[in-house]
Image: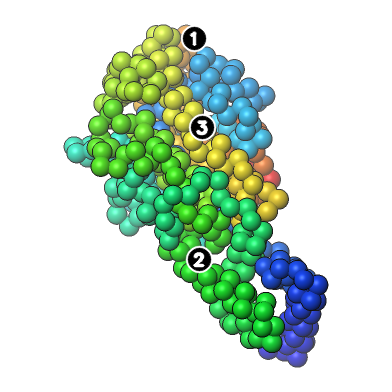
Amino acid sequence: MSLLTSRHAFLKKTLQRRVLLKALGLGIAAPLAIKMSRLATAQDMKRPTRLFLFYVPHGLPLAHWEVGGEMNFSKSGVGILSALEPYREYVTVMRGVGIKTSTNHAAIRSSFTGTESSNSIDYEIAKQLKTTSHVLGAYANPPGAGSDAQLIKHGGWVDPIANPADALDELFPGLTAGGAPPPTTDMSDVEFRNQALALTEGELETMQSELSDLTGEANKLNIHLESLRGFRAAAEGGGGVGVISCKERPALASAESMKGKDPYDVANLTAVVEGHLEAAAYSMLCGTSRIVTMQNLYANGQVMMDFPGGPGIAKNHHDPLSHTGKENETQLAEFATAQKWFYTKLVEKFISVLDADDPADPGRKVLDNTVVMTMSEIVDGSNHTSDYNKDVWDVAGGPREVYIPTLLIGKGGGTIKGGQSVYVPGADHRDLLATVAHAMGVQISDIGGKSVSPIQEVLA
């Protein structure tokens, strides 16, 4: 260490200690005093980003999805994206993206991996961030589903957690059940953890040593510092953002209602979808999870869409519903209604929860520090097109520009602009995966042997 560097470190530590002791001398509580001392010499810190991948199978009718350049969420037909209107500043509609594979079945396994031979993007990001990627599924891999259910690859293909009741312990490690859904906002708790979790073990020990002469406050501080180590261990074990803002696991009715029930009984599908979404959202809000993927159904899943609480359509999702002929507008509207149900649940049970102050980054919302990517493996179930194409005929009787229906929701820690419809005709979806990684602070330059880079039009 150079003399200049050593002197800088000494002055930094001296200033922090003086600010801390002065604050304590003024009667300010120890947690806030620590915050003040750290802020006295603080460097810019990375924001606490989260990632949520959301898969809905077998495409959708683009005529009911389009928002145009003006971002009109109710512009077309049944308005699949209409529930997102209140969150328009956080939404990026991707137009023109294609999955460049030879068949739609290969596209299933390429949706989040880029290529079948690669690991999925959630795994690659989690590996670099030294955290955990959780995988949830709603009727995602029932017996007999086979390769059509293969979507997430963590070295090998992952079988998602099917029952949201089983996901609770994994998503909320270290927290006992019974808490109210909103996390605590007590300054002496959340703010202390937010600042102090950035300290190393050595810094924690130094802080305790330097305050050893402040008997009264030191005792209180020691309690906080010791409990902090437990919070850190819980956060690391569950792949959290580093700040646990909930004292107990929130009471989540849908997930808890599934305890002991069959998640592959279609009568329970609404509770499974809602339970997974709420559990994922609150675990991110509480800070106990950071990266979660949710697979809804599987590509060829024959699920009747008139289940309780569902879209109310008495047809199987895969066939005939998603295979609706492009010449039949009534049937296309039914398929659009079925797909709209999933996007509406995403908004109601996940996006709305994250539209809250970020306990790990006061002054911003969790959505500001989150990136949600929605994905399907094909454009629509009738044409089975996975790549961008300008010559597919639609119900209006003419050629229609088609692309994979994809959204980004959230601002990814300030890296994503949001509030726009981005037109990138012919863009490779692997570049979109690189964009998501970039928003999480991870740089990926190659996927499956192809050079990739973030899509610049998306970035802030």
Q: Position of residue 104 (x, y in %)?
A: 34, 33
Q: Which mark is residue 396?
A: 1
Residue type, label 3: Glu
Helix, strand or loop for disc 1 = loop
Q: Position of residue 235 (x, y in %)?
A: 48, 62
Q: Residue at x 49, y 9 (%)?
A: 396
Residue type, label 2: Phe
Which residue is under mark 3?
348
In primary-sequence order, the first of circles 3 and 1 is 3
Q: In this orientation, which residue lies closer to the viewer: 421 or 47?
A: 47
Q: Quadrant of residue 172?
A: bottom left
Q: Residue at x 48, y 49 (%)?
A: 179
Which residue is under mark 2?
231
Q: Can residue 145 be seen from the camera position used here? A: yes
Helix, strand or loop for disc 3 = helix
Q: Position of residue 429 (x, y in %)?
A: 48, 41
Question: Looking at the picture, does residue 154 appear above or below residue 301?
Answer: below
Q: Position of residue 84 (x, y in %)?
A: 57, 29
